[in-house]
Amino acid sequence: MTTQQLVQQIRQKKSFLCIGLDVDLTKIPPHLLALEDPIFEFNKAIIEATHDLCVSYKPNTAFYEAYGLKGWTSLQKTINYLNDNYPQIFTIADAKRGDIGNTSTMYAKAFLEDLNFDSVTVAPYMGKDSVEPFLAFENKHTIMLALTSNEGAFDFQTKNVEGEELYKTVIKTSKTWKNSQNLMYVVGATKAEYFAEIRKMVPNSFFLVPGVGAQGGSLTEVCQYGMNEDVGLLINSSRGIIYASNETDFAQKAREEAIKLQQEMEAIMKF
Amino acid sequence: MTTQQLVQQIRQKKSFLCIGLDVDLTKIPPHLLALEDPIFEFNKAIIEATHDLCVSYKPNTAFYEAYGLKGWTSLQKTINYLNDNYPQIFTIADAKRGDIGNTSTMYAKAFLEDLNFDSVTVAPYMGKDSVEPFLAFENKHTIMLALTSNEGAFDFQTKNVEGEELYKTVIKTSKTWKNSQNLMYVVGATKAEYFAEIRKMVPNSFFLVPGVGAQGGSLTEVCQYGMNEDVGLLINSSRGIIYASNETDFAQKAREEAIKLQQEMEAIMKF
């Protein structure tokens, strides 16, 4: 998918919502556990109830790997279901991978070719040759960790590196990499005051923004500092939507939560 | 496995060799491709030919994920084969994972519980709460990226952070985390001159050392600067051993390469 297609979808749906499909068997409605593939059935119901309200789905691979082969089967069925039924939706493999060049190529193939996601998240610690293999895929996107939404973000990401915070060095350096136009960045919503500066550094890039809702970030503040002309934001919500209820009405309740966020987004886009 | 058991094995085998099982279907002997699970058959043959010469095996998860469900089946069969037949061998899931707390817990379960590896590699960028969930597993080990062997290591890892290189800040900070006694560190062999300083910072920790052989690092230099009383090193070789031949003699040739390294190690341990 091209960035332009993503922007078009955002304008059509008046939404820049990304729904995180982080499926934990201990949190989903118990009646689903009797089914053959509870994770996939849960995802399918969530997707059916929310696909007109969001522009992106983001399964976090950890939640699938934790269930071994069964989990990978559920992941594969989920991405296939999305690609078959909603090809206009931007899919993110939230995998946070990164390794030496030939190994990163294997990861890129796994997520961007074999599973055919539109994008994958990567970690920057190993530098240029660990990220460029992902960037080589045309019309695919690599979403690199810049400033994350967790407490540990302050351990290294905000440390002063030769006059500026590490996450700024990471963003600046990444702009020099081959095919850097395929980069997006993870920027946590819990640090809204940082958005203005980051936006200046990469005016045209999309940010994937975790931390709204469950982790306490404010949508309005993020938009105030982080939006660009193409919106340029994908606001992720996982638990706040998918676990809105763990009864048989879970999909309906997820839809209600997604509507709330979509309406907030529509109001902000009008403004 | 406890660190003591690992050290005992090193002394018995007079080896601190780790063999990387990075199986690429385009590089293994073509006659194996006719079999039902070529990756597992390849691994089994390599393991049978080398298990008395090495103390550890390290499958890199990228090479399995690239083949989707089939790849995960091969990974599962490989670790089960190791645990069933050679439980004294230290197994490493080279996965380089790391995410916010509840997600890292899922990764930790995937590799340390479900697949039952002895250890897993992790990336430090997201800080304390992304690594501590791995450290919570008793008699399991978390091998954190410190200074890697690739070119991109110089993009961020060696950058000056408030008076010292980032990788040093990473190591120092990690020592303050809960259950930090379960930490080991990835330190690339291509930077042997750095070993002395790193060893001073963490005198008792094991280092997983990639980059000897294919990537040009010197075993003698690494040992000169990096060894401690318990050896404290796991020297990884992947391609140099497993792809020594791609004919029907591949396992025998892999053994010959492993013998060369084991003998070098024995000589160094005597010295």
Image: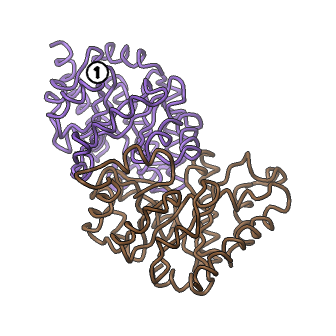
Chain colours: A purple, B brown
- Residue A196: x %, y % from top left: 18, 27
Q: Residue at x 53, y 70 (%)?
A: B234
Rendered position, A46 above or below B242 = above
Determine if residue A249 is in view: no
Q: Name the one closer to the observer, A48 or B32.
A: B32
Mark 1, residue position: A203
Residue in the image at 49% along x and 62% along y = B192
Residue A70, x across and y down, in percent: 53, 53
Q: Amino acid at mark 1?
A: Pro
Between A6 and A97, which is closer to the camera in this rendering? A97
The relative height of residue B146 versus residue B86 in the rendered view (above or below) is above
Residue at position x 32%, y 43% from top? A248
Q: Chain of mark 1?
A: A
- Image quarter where the C terminus of chain A lies is top left
Q: Quadrant of residue A164?
A: top left
**Residue at the spot x=58%, y=67% of the render?**
B219
In the image, residue A15 lies at what x, y percent? 28, 21
On the image, the x and y values in percent for residue B10 come to 56, 81
Quadrant hosting residue A255: top left
Q: Is residue A95 visible?
A: yes
User: Is A167 situated above or below B208?
Assistant: above
What secondary structure is found at the residue carrying circle 1? loop
A35 and B198: which one is in front?
Answer: B198
A212 vs B104: above or below: above
